[in-house]
């Protein structure tokens, strides 16, 4: 599927890349954020509504770019409240996140959103000349529609279920489509070193969530960072983590 640049002007020229993986699932990336830091922003187009999963840093207008390509109502859902996933949530009118992180979404700090980890080198270009990454924090985005385990998001022709995968953060979630076997995993699982020792991470619970993830009949994992992959690769990543090869405290190049 082709990749295009979404270009529009709102006081400044802004680019996102947009790549369709299928007729109704697309991957959006912030082109001014380094590839090792930016999260995957997922756009699922339904017959009645659209779903945005994760919203990036929010340094450029994301919601306005989506409006350029879809006229349906938009549900924005964050897999967790960290700065690289929840930064653009405030731009949407329907905002979803897990109930256990509601306070962080509404009252973010650099510490609570782990924005202290991002550095100047992670930005290819500043959003404006006076921008200071060392003091920056994402904007408040009070949750309008809290979600928890078992909740359903109905787009008309596609139905997704919220799966609670705590460990990386208390409110980390997966978004599961039973009919296709697709799972959006956020930072619970991706092909890289897994961040399991942040201030509110709990490694033992994280391991329980990964073990639970292996129980789902998954066809495709659309991860929070990096490429999508199938069930075999999912098992490999989880097994390597359990063996200590992918923890942030003892990363081993795979």
Image (cartoon, grey):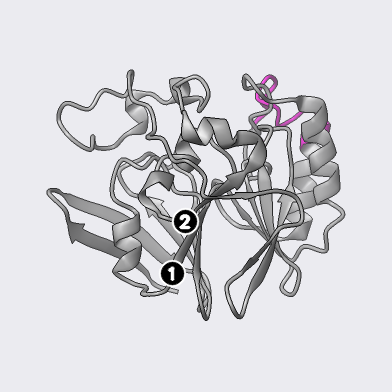
- The residue that disc 2 covers is 94
Q: Residue at x 68, y 27 (%)?
A: 196
Locate residue 157, reporting x and y percent: 61, 80
Is there a contact, CB below 8 Å, between mark 1 and mark 2? yes
State whether the magenta stretch is mostly helix, strand or loop: loop
| Horizontal arrangement in the rendering, residue 14 relative to residue 159 (left or right) | left
Q: Kindly identify the residue that appears in the image at 23 percent across and 34 percent down.
A: 126
Q: Is residue 250 above or below residue 21?
A: above
Label 2 SS: loop
Magenta segment range?
Answer: 241-254
Relative vertical location of residue 128 with respect to residue 221 in this rendering, above or below: above
Q: In terms of depth relative to the viewer, which is nearer, 1 or 24? A: 24
Mark 1 Cα shell of 10 Å, populated few (<14), some (14-19), many (≥20): some
User: Which residue is painted at 78% across and 37% down in the image?
Assistant: 240
Q: Is residue 153 left or right of residue 207?
A: left
Q: Which residue is mark 1?
A: 73
Does residue 247 belong to the magenta stretch?
A: yes
Residue 162 is at least partly visible in this image: yes
**Which label belongs to residue 238?**
none
The percent coordinates of residue 250 (x first, y second) are 70, 21
Q: Which of the two discs, 1 and 2, labels the residue nearer the N terminus?
A: 1
Q: Nearer the viewer, residue 146 or 33?
A: 146
Residue most toward the left? 11
Circle 2 residues within 10 Å: few <14, some 14–19, many ≥20? some
Q: Quadrant of residue 194?
A: top right
């Amino acid at each position: 599927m082709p990749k295009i640049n979404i270009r529009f002007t709102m006081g400044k020229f802004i680019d996102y890349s947009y790549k369709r993986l299928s007729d109704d699932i697309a991957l959006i990336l912030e082109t001014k954020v380094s590839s090792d830091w930016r999260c995957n922003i997922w756009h699922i187009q339904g017959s009645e509504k659209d779903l945005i999963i994760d919203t990036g840093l929010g340094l450029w207008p994301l919601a306005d770019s989506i409006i350029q390509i879809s006229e349906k109502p938009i549900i924005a859902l964050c897999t967790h409240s960290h700065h690289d996933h929840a930064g653009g949530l405030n731009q949407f009118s329907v905002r979803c996140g897990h109930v256990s992180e509601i306070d962080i979404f509404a009252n973010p700090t650099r510490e609570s959103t782990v924005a202290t980890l991002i550095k100047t080198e992670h930005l290819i270009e500043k959003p404006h000349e006076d921008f200071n990454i060392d003091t920056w924090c994402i904007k408040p985005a009070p949750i309008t529609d809290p979600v928890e385990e078992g909740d359903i998001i109905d787009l008309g022709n596609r139905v997704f279920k919220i799966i609670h995968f705590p460990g990386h953060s208390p409110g980390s979630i997966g978004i599961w489509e039973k009919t296709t076997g697709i799972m959006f995993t956020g930072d619970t699982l991706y092909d890289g070193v897994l961040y399991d020792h942040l201030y509110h991470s709990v490694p033992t619970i994280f391991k329980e969530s990964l073990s639970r993830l292996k129980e789902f009949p998954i066809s495709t994992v659309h991860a929070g960072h990096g490429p999508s992959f199938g069930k075999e690769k999912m098992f490999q990543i989880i097994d390597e983590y359990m063996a200590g090869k992918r923890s942030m405290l003892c990363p081993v190049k795979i």
